[in-house]
Structures are given as C-alpha cells and as structure tokens.
C-alpha cells in the first residue's frame, strides 16, 4: 500500500511539473512574438477574408450558407434573377451608418469587392436588378447579416 501511494505521489508531482513547464514555455514563446509580426498575421487574415468559401452558382453549385447569418469570409447569396436586368446593384448599410455599394452582372456574386471595408457588426444587404439604362427593375434579394471579426492581433488575449 505504501509503495502504491508513493508511485501515485511521484506521478502527481511529475504531472504538475510537466504542466507548469508547458505553461512556462508557452509564455516564453508568446512573449517573443513581437507586435509587428502579430499585426502582419492580422493583415493576412483580412486579405484572406475577402476570398469567399465555396460560393454557389444557381443550378450548378449549392450555396453552403443558406441558413447562415454570420460571416468572417465574404459571403454570396442565392438571390433571384430579375427579368431584363443587365446588372445588379449591391448595397450594404451597417448599423453604425457605414454604407458601400458595388455592381455585378449576377445577383449571387460574393461581397468580396467591399468585404474588407465592412465593419464588424450587423449590416443590411439589398441587391437590386438594374436595366441597361440604370432603372430599378426590382429587388433580387435582401437580408440582415453579421460581419464577424477576423484575426487581428495574436497578443490580445495573452
């Protein structure tokens, strides 16, 4: 009985030191990551966030985000095609007043052209079909979504 207790005690001490040394190594390594390199990762993450993940094409490729409302990466939506529309106006308005527009020849284009400038938070999207003269022909689709934050700084939570 005494031998078993001694082995359990030694095992506990070993695990404690292993755990403590792991935390120490993590703190030492994370302290050596300078602020410049963490901002570099944030810039890379922002650049990658404008690339949509598997955007759909009606009748060919399904849209993965049919029920999603929060996005880190530029989304694309399965909005309807408007008869006689030659282009579509995308208008994003965030709850803090930010507004951005762009045009595409399809109502299901990813929001990549403006995604990097959309602030974190809720935004409304309206896609309107336009004639070749610029007249509004109807709303292809709309919705309220959330622009989630991308990685910005690795040292924030250390």
Image (tube, rainbow, N blue to C red):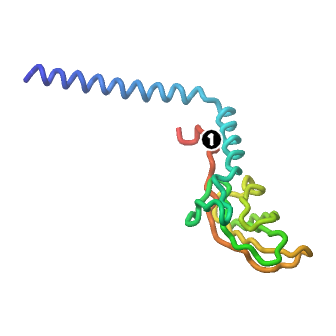
Q: Is residue 54 left or right of residue 131?
A: left
Quarter of the image that includes the N terminus: top left
Image location (x, y in percent) of residue 79:
68, 70
Q: Residue furthest left?
A: 1
Query: Which residue does the image show at 67% across and 53% down from the upper left?
Result: 52
The mark tally for this picture is 1
Q: Position of residue 104 (x, y in %)?
A: 80, 63
133 vs 1, left or right, is right
Q: Position of residue 57 (x, y in %)?
A: 68, 62
In the figure, is residue 2 to the left or right of 69?
A: left
Q: Give percent across and percent down for residue 83.
A: 78, 78
At mark 1, the secondary structure is: loop
Q: Quadrant of residue 94?
A: bottom right
The image quadrant that residue 119 belongs to is bottom right
Task: Spot the residue most to the right.
Answer: 133
Asked if 41 appears above or below 11 in the picture, the reply is below
How crowded is the residue under tag 1: few (<14 C-alpha within 10 Å), some, or many (20+)?
A: some
Q: Nearer the viewer, residue 12 or 73?
A: 73
- Quadrant hosting residue 154: top right
Give me the residue at 70% from left, 73% from top: 80
Q: Residue at x 62, y 45 (%)?
A: 151
Disc 1 target residue: 153
- Looking at the picture, tell me which residue is in the foreground, 51 or 107: 107
Query: Height in image: 40 above or below 70?
Result: above
Residue located 40% across and 24% down the image: 21
Residue at the limit of the structure toward the front, as seen here: 60
């Amino acid at each position: 009985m005494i031998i078993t207790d001694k082995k359990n005690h030694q095992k506990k001490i070993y695990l404690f030191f292993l755990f403590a040394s792991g935390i120490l190594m993590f703190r030492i390594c994370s302290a050596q990551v300078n602020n410049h390199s963490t901002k570099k990762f944030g810039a890379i993450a922002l650049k990658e966030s404008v690339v949509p993940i598997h955007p759909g094409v009606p009748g060919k490729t399904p849209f993965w985000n049919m029920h999603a409302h929060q996005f880190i990466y530029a989304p694309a939506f399965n909005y309807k095609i408007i008869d006689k529309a030659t282009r579509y106006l995308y208008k994003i308005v965030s709850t803090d007043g930010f507004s951005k527009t762009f045009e595409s020849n399809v109502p299901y284009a990813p929001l990549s052209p403006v995604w990097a400038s959309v602030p974190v938070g809720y935004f409304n999207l309206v896609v309107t079909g336009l004639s070749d003269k610029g007249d509004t022909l109807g709303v292809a689709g709309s919705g309220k979504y959330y622009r989630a934050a991308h990685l910005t700084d690795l040292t924030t939570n250390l």
